Image: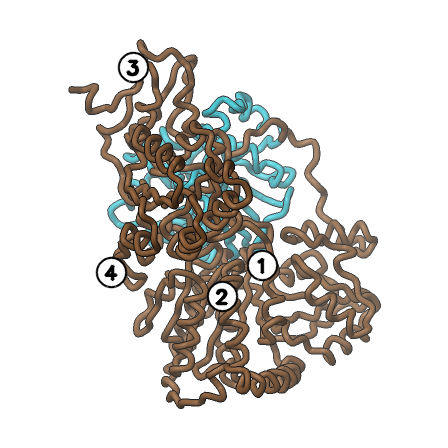
Amino acid sequence: MLKPVDLLMVGVGGQGTILASRVLAMAAQEAGYDIKVSEIHGMAQRGGSVVTQVRMGEKVYSPLVTESGADVVLAFEKLEGLRFLPFLKPGGIMIVNNHEIPPVPVLIGAAEYPPDILERVRTISPNTFVVDAFDIALKCGNPKAANIVLLGVLARNLPIEREIWEKALSARVPPKFLEVNRSAFAAGYEYK
Amino acid sequence: MKELLSGNAAIARGAFESGVTVAAAYPGTPSTEILELFSSYPGIYAEWAPNEKVAMEVGIGASIAGARTLVAMKHVGVNVAADPLLTFAYTGVNGGVVLVSADDPGMHSSQNEQDNRYYAKFAKIPLLEPGDSQEAKDMIGIALDISEQFDTPVMLRTTTRVSHSQGFVEIGGPKSIAIRPYVKDAKKYLMVPAFARMRRALLEERLAKLKEYSEKSPLNAIEWRGRAIGIITSGISYQYVRESLPGASVLKLGLTNPLPEKLIRQFAGGVQKLIVVEELEPFVEDQVRSLGITVSGKDLLPDTGELNVQVIAGKFAEAGLLSPSEKAPVKADGLVTAAIPGRPPVLCPGCPHRGLFFALRKLKLIATGDIGCYTLSGLPPLEAMDSCICMGASIGTAHGFGKADPELGGRTVAVIGDSTFLHSGITGLLNMVYNKGAGTVVILDNSTTAMTGHQHHPGTGSTLMGEQAQAVDFEALVRALGVKRVRVIDPLDLGEITKALQEEVAAREPSVIICRRPCILLKRATADDVILVQTEKCRGCKACLRLGCPAISMKGKLAHVDPDACTGCGLCVQVCRDGALVKGGSANA
């Protein structure tokens, strides 16, 4: 019996959530899961919030994660992590990229970027990993691999073997970026 | 072999496997990917039509000529295509035809959330509602078979969550379907009143046969579980029902027009309480009630927006219909979610539309708007658009302003994108010329259909199949409609835009300003173009912030330009009164 897992990947258009969700879907398929992945397109390139919902289990019906239903919320951006926190299950795992992308209401001075996001997130979710994914990816050779660093942290917290992840990564990442993404994934996977 | 496919990808795959050789569409979320993906299969033809009506007509022609045909559009597109559709229902088909209507409950990317199932009932054609990707693929094949068996176009209605959710799909090989011979048959295809009356009678006979088919089709099936509650459902709602009410009996309807009356009566007779779970309108519920069956539905569940597991479980629990083992999930409470700034979509850094809207706002002009990325200019800080109704509406609306109140009309500008103008703006402009309007129309020509992800159109010089094509000459086109004042400007030149707007609004005849510059996402700027802030000159007046450019913010009291986001479009340089913003290249020189 496969343990069902519901998760959300949230961020801002252009952060690489799509590639991360493709690798995840392939790994889950390889591990024998039924899976549904739901994305809302259309506004992604215009700087809006981007949400990918992933549900895995023996048999998945609804493609949508419920509020208080996510085992994991993976936030590619801090504010988006806070925004989707109500979807986290009590006791669920929060993975937050320590990265700020101010939205336009903040840029034009109509709103304030909350200064205390990490405290708020940690208060609600004791199981929070804050990851400096850009710095880690930079050390691996390319800051654009930050999404794969975060995927590595996620992988460590899901019931799928590491070999399956690595196979999925090789299949989904273009060969010329594979080496840097492999080391980014490893850095994420071994992140403490 | 199983592949993870979105509903739209599964529809494209299903069309390919079922022998569709001609497909036509106009892009619109959530339907766009269907044709994009279908166009990549071998041995088929697919095209972007300038609008949904033309796409439908191309589909009708291909069908009469004998090909299996797919036509796809978003829900509001069916409004545009309704004219040919409702008479195509009379003529029927030769090669099978499936019309995909991608509805958008919750209005993720739409101006309304109309429930297009009523179109199928209105046109008296069969309606299929897939609930996941596998069903979407399978139902395309079934729809084509029904279409040919019953001589009718078939509507397949998805919703955003079906179109844009991925699930596993069993991949099959393509079926080779021979083109049916075309036989001239005026009584079938020439809908003059005498022949249309004959087809009208056949329409009812066909519907009666389809009703029998609906009773026996495996698309409509009862799943017996507990008998206390019986749910009738279709589409994505089935998935939500299976999770929120795992113990309930379900009548799952895949074919929802015409409804299987006997099967519904049988199901109703086998359960204690009958409830219809459907998104948006009580389409099935009202019809069940009209059979004289006691049924519940919209008295429990919302008739606006999307359903989900949580909504259904919550409403059933409120009504005392959930047993303790099926209780609703605990609602998140006490989570710190106050004061979270929103992240609305915005015009991209370097977007060529930005300058026009900045100028419109500055000149305090009324802007009747249209459908496209530029509709985002109606939001803060630009707030430069007064109305947005539907594709092509901007021009007729501006003309109406002028006819109601010439003074108001003299301050009104219609704003429309290139793809939208070709979709349904041409007739509006023709009307303005013919009926002696004096409006100003701005065509924002960014050489693509940007909002839906950069599709080609008759103005881009390329087709969906990747071939070169004749590109429409916008200047010549609007002149041919009778517009004498036509000018082309660069929308990144604020001085030129302002002058053009002032002069054309003052002119007492129709005028067209074409703002021409490609979408910034089609052509990235080079790194040394980015704008630099000369901090010693910046006084922190925030004039640049009014552009609503995501690359510009305040760092402390001074302007800051994010070099990773900036494309060097130079609008902010023109807005800055203190010369504090300069092009990178010129600062280095």
Q: Earlier in the sequence, mark 4 or mark 3?
A: 4
- Residue position for label 2: B81
Mark 3 vs mark 2: in front = 2
Q: Colour of chain A?
A: cyan
Callout 4: residue from which chain?
Answer: B
Please state which amino acid type lies under the numbered disc 3.
Answer: Gln
Task: For mark 4, give the secondary structure.
Answer: loop
At 56% across and 32% down in the image, what residue appears? Answer: A82
- Residue position for label 4: B470
How much space separates mark 4 and mark 3, taking CA atoms? 46 Å
- Residue position for label 1: A60
How much space separates mark 4 and mark 1, taking CA atoms? 48 Å
Please state which amino acid type lies under the numbered disc 2.
Answer: Ala
Report the side of B251 relative to B323 (left or right).
left
Residue B321 falls in which quadrant of the image? bottom right
Please state which amino acid type lies under the numbered disc 1.
Answer: Val
Callout 2: residue from which chain?
Answer: B
Mark 4 nearby-residue class (10 Å; few <14, some 14–19, many ≥20): few
Q: Let me know if residue A11 appears in the view.
A: no
Mark 3 nearby-residue class (10 Å; few <14, some 14–19, many ≥20): some
Compared to A26, does A139 lie above or below?
above
How much space separates mark 3 and mark 2, taking CA atoms? 55 Å
At 66% across and 53% down in the image, what residue appears? Answer: B309
Task: For mark 2, give the secondary structure.
Answer: helix
How many callouts does the rendering have?
Answer: 4
Numbered label attached to residue B237: none
- Residue position for label 3: B534
Mark 2 nearby-residue class (10 Å; few <14, some 14–19, many ≥20): some
